[in-house]
Image: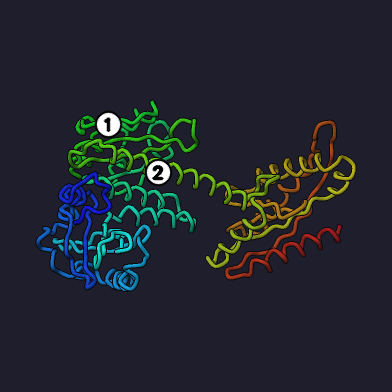
Amino acid sequence: MAAEGTNGVLGPGDFEALVGSAVSPFVLIDLTGTIRWVGASITELTGWEVDELVGRNMLEFLDEPSQVAVIDAFARFVETSASGPAWLGTGIPIGVLCKSGEIVLCVASSATEARTGVPGVIAIQLFRGAAHRHLHRAVRAMATGEPLEAVLVHLADMVASEIAGATVEIGWAWDGDAFAGITGNAGGILARDDGSPGERPWAAAMSTADSVATEAIDALPAPIAAAATAAGTTGCWVHPLAVVPGERPTAAVVVWRHQEIDATTFNAQYLDRGVDLAALALQWARGHDSLEREARIDSLTGLANRRSFFERLREATPAGEPGTVLFCDLDRFKPVNDRHGHTVGDRVLVILGERLQRSVRPTDLVARYGGDEFTVLCPGLTDPEEIANLTERLRRATADPVRVGEATVEVGITIGSAPLAPGADADEVVTAAADAMRAAKRGR
C-alpha cells in the first residue's frame, strides 16, 4: 500500500502493518471484484487464510442475497470510482461465508479511488454486523409494540454477539429475592433459581447497585450451579440497572463467561451500551404500559372505559361464551351537578363506581360507559334469578346516601339487561341493554 495520505508520519511498511492488523479487516479489490489484498484479521473473522482469498472473486465468499446487494453497490462504485461517492456511509449488511461453512453477518463500508487516491482499487472494511442486526430487531420490536421480553432478548443477543465467549441473560422486576422476568441466550440459567442456599452475585449487585463479578460457579445455588456448569460457563459478570435514574436498580444484565474474557475497554463499552439500552427498553415498556392503561381505563373512576368494555365484549362473543350485559344509568344525578357543582358530582361518580365494583362477581367487568352511565359484562350469567339478584345488589349499593364534604346526596340507578348469545353483535347487545334500561325508566 502507498504511504500517500499518511502525512509523513508512517512509512509504506508501517501503514500496511497498521491496516493489516486492524480488528475489523480491510480488503482491497480491483474493478473486476478480484481480491488483491486482505488484512490478517480476516482469519479470525472468517477462518480463511490470507493466501486462500487473494486472487479470488469476492462474490465467492458471500451468501446469495448479499451477492445481489454487493453487485448493485459495486456497479455504482465502479461507475463513479474517480469522482465519488468517496465513502459508502455506514455500509451495507452482507453475509460472509466462513471456511467452516457458517455465514457471519457483517457490515461492509467501502471507499473508492476518490477517497483513497489509489486508481482502480476499492477498499472495503468488514465489521461484525450481528450486533447491528440484533439492535435493529430490538428497535423494531419496540416500534411495533411487542412485549418487553421480545425487545430484551434481542439486546441480550446483541451484547453476546459483541463479546466472544459469552452468553447473556437480562432479568427485570427484581422483588428482593428473584427476577419476575428473565430472558436471553444462556439457556435459562437464572430461571433455575428455586430458592436453594448459595451465593447470588445478582442479589449483591442489586443490593449495592454496583457491578459484581464471580468465578465461583460452585458457590451458586445448586440448580443454578448445575445449569451453569452444564452450559460450560466459568463465571459471570452482573451489571445492575435502574429503570428510573436515581432509583434502586430493578433489573440486571448478566454475562456468563465461557472462556477467559479480558475486561478490556472494548468489552466494557459493549456491556455499558447493553445496560443503557436495556434501561431504555424498560423505560419504554413502563411508558407503553402506562399509555395502554390510560387508553383502557376511565381517568375519573379508574374503571374500564367504553373502549376496554367493547374489546372484552367482542372477545367474548366469538368464543361462544353466553352471558349477560347490564346497562346502568344513575337517577337524579343531574341535580347533583347543578346544586353542588361538578367537583362534587365527579366524586359521587367515583364513590358509586367503587360500590358497583364491590357488588359484582370477580369475573364481571364494570365500565364507565360515559357521563353517569355504567355497563357490566357478566360472562356465564344466564340464570334469570341470578341476574335479578345481581341487579338488586347494584340497586342497593347505589341507594345509600353519598356524602362528599358538607354535601349529602341521594341517587338511584336504573338497570336494563340483554342476553349475550354466542356470535352476537357487541353493539347490538349493548343497544338492547340500553333500550331495556330506558324502558324501565319510562315504566316507573
Foreground residue, 167 or 71? 71
Q: Secondary structure at mark 2?
A: strand
Count residues near mark 1 (Cα–Cα under 10 Å), then give few for <14, some for 14-19, many for 20+. Answer: some
Identify which residue, 67 or 80, lies in the foreground: 80
Q: Which residue is located at x 11 percent, y 58 percent?
A: 49
Determine which quarter of the picture holds residue 323: bottom right
Q: Hey, what amino acid is under mark 1? A: Ala
The answer to whether the residues at label 2 and label 1 have Cβ atoms under 8 Å apart is no
On the image, the x and y values in percent for residue 226 come to 20, 39
Q: Residue furthest left?
A: 51
Nearer-N-terminus badge (2/1): 2
Q: From the viewer's perspective, tell me whether residue 323 is left or right of residue 208.
A: right
Left or right: 290 in relation to 157: right
Dot 2 crowding, Cα within 10 Å, few <14, some 14–19, many 20+: some
> What SS does tag 1 mark?
strand
Q: Is residue 307 above or below residue 9?
A: below
- Of badges 2 and 1, the one in the foreground is 1
Q: Amino acid at mark 2?
A: Gly
Find residue 34 and report its image quarter: bottom left
256 or 411: which is nearer to us?
256
What residue sits 24% from the left and 65% below the top?
121
Q: Which quadrant of the structure image shows residue 270? A: top left
What residue appears at the point 21 percent right and 52 percent down from the top-left corner?
Answer: 3
Q: Which residue is mark 2?
A: 181
Indicate the quadrant containing the N terminus: top left, top right, bottom left or bottom right: bottom left
The total number of labels drawn is 2
Q: How is the image coloured?
A: rainbow
Residue 213 — which label? 1
